[in-house]
Image (cartoon, rainbow, N blue to C red):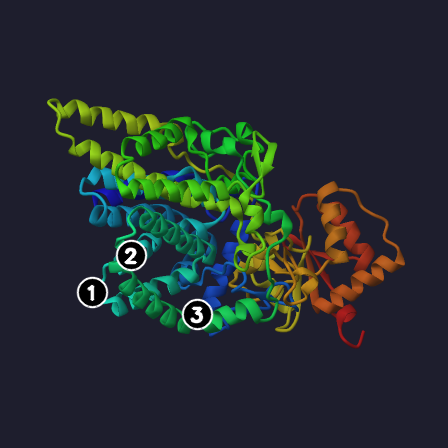
Amino acid sequence: MAVGGLFLLAALWVTSRLWLDPSGRAASLYTGDPAQVQFFLAHSVRVVLHGEYPFYTEQFNYPDGVNLMANTAVLALGIPMVPVTLLFGPAVSFVVLVTLGLAGTAMAWYAMLSRQLVRTPLAAAAGGWFCGFSPAMLSHASWHPNIINQFLLPFIVWRVLALTRSQRPVRDGALLALLVSAQAFINEEILLFTALACGVFLLAVLAQEPARWSAAWRPLAVGLAACALLAGALLAYPLYVQFAGPMAYHGLSDAVQDYGNDVAAFFAPGSPTLGGNQRANVNLAPNYSEENAFFGWSLSLLAVGIVVWLRREMVVRALAVTGGFFAVLSLGERVSWWDRELFTGPWQMLVHLPLLDAVVPTRFGLITSVVVGLLLALAVERAWALRPADRRTVRTLTAAGLAFALLPIAPMPLRMVSRPPVPQFITADRWRAYVGPDQTLVPIPVPSMGNTHGMRWAAAINLDFKIPGGYFLAPRNGNTGDRGRFGGRPSGVTQVLEEVATTGRTPKLDDRQRRRCMDELRHWRAAILVLPVRQQNSEPLRRTVEQLVGPGRQELDVWVWDVRTLTARSA
């Protein structure tokens, strides 16, 4: 309980700036991911209260809809959080998930390590701390609660290793299947990483001690078969929807597939840490939400030193192979040093394989982070077990070594920026007088990867109205089965309004552009267009919309254009 309390206090420290105003603050630089997660949390409310279909929705990107299984809809997190979402809103649920994700992951690793790998509480705490609060976890904390909620992973690893010596492999395989199925509804990519890491680790063990195979293969085979059958039965339909259902896509866009770590990133401290500096980390990671290495020089040298010191232990050698293997894969298709390309990486040979074509390679560094945490736990355990004449000196040196390695990457409060409030027009339900069940409310600018405020409006009232566009993954041009991209079909309205919102310049629209925009509004079955009065560049946006549909009127804190007569089917 003491260790869990320490982890929780640390998580509250990291999220403290967000707790001050969950609805009015968001992570700096990229505000799209929190808005997307809040939208998915609101969808979980509709699943529980209204029995809505969980794996697909038309509440955004109307009328094409979004395949939620092909996105990270976090159903296994959102459904338990429904009471919090109902009482306090999805923004509060988001910060709760971030806080509990950091603390829960650290505590889960502590529980597994203290029962299976080490006996010294400090050793388990050191390993659990790094697994829960590594620079990679802090990087994702501002944007990706689906990635940092890794509290099931230690138990999945535990059960896989337990299968190699199980006396009841069918039972243990069934338990593993339940854990796997639950993790699939948190984040499938992390589940795939866990499976790959377990496979590489076991192969590294068998390469060193082949005799283990004769005793391990039978229970492992029976357990994994039982796991595959049960998990396959539980996940068969959701996976069918994901890969063959409406708006399914096959593979990510080339831009995301090319995300890789710079070699120098392993020696720099992460941006959200005590020794971190965003400016110093420019070009070392794809962006600040994907700093999946960043151990700093001290910890990198310490990790190498641990491997050298404990090199005679089979587990340490297997961990070193596992961590090194995925560190190399995390470099991506082109290996670089301080943004200077050196040579082609091995990931280029794997990137087009099934399943791996949907992986962001830089995130393989998350596996290396866990390996470093396990090495820290083993090192503290071995140092604590030494019996020299002056044990106190050894323990003091061990504590100093931990401080030397971990202090530069100690977690700091996440950086936040203010974001516009949800308009009173939305929260006061004034929109209900205009929008019918099969119509859309069109936020201005239209929701997209770079403009997600409209998604927050819908999430704030549990998706009671539909919106066009949004931030999500979908097949290119809306053709099911094509390669994935961010956003739906290309839209003339969206493009025009995004340019105005960015530049502040009002374009002169011709008749062809107006006709195209009106066709899109009819396709969306738009009922009203809504522009907040305090929206950035609201005046140029208002003048642009007036060129399309005529004058609007101010209602409370927004401009409203009632376009029902223009978009009706008869029109």
Residue depth check, mark 3 versus mark 2: number of the one nearer the observer: 2
The amino acid on which the numbered mark 1 sits, given as a three-letter code, is Gln
Which of disc 2 and disc 3 is earlier in sequence? 2
Which comes before the other along the chain, label 3 or label 1?
A: 1
Pick the residue in front: 475 or 567.
475
User: Counting other residues with Cα less than 10 Å from the Cα at mark 3, is it few (<14), some (14-19), or many (20 or more)?
Assistant: some
Residue drawn at x 56%, y 60% as measured from the top left: 458
What kind of residue is marked 3?
Leu
For residue 167, the mark is 1
Residue 435 relative to residue 356: left or right = right
In the rendered structure, the answer to whether residue 260 lies left or right of residue 506 reads left
**Mark 2: few, some, or many residues within 10 Å (few <14, many ≥20)?**
some
Placement of 567 over or under 371, stated as above or below: below
Residue lying at 39% horizontally and 44% vertically, measured from the top left: 322
Q: Amino acid at mark 2?
A: Trp
The residue that label 3 is drawn on is 235
Q: CA distance from mark 2 to mark 1?
A: 16 Å
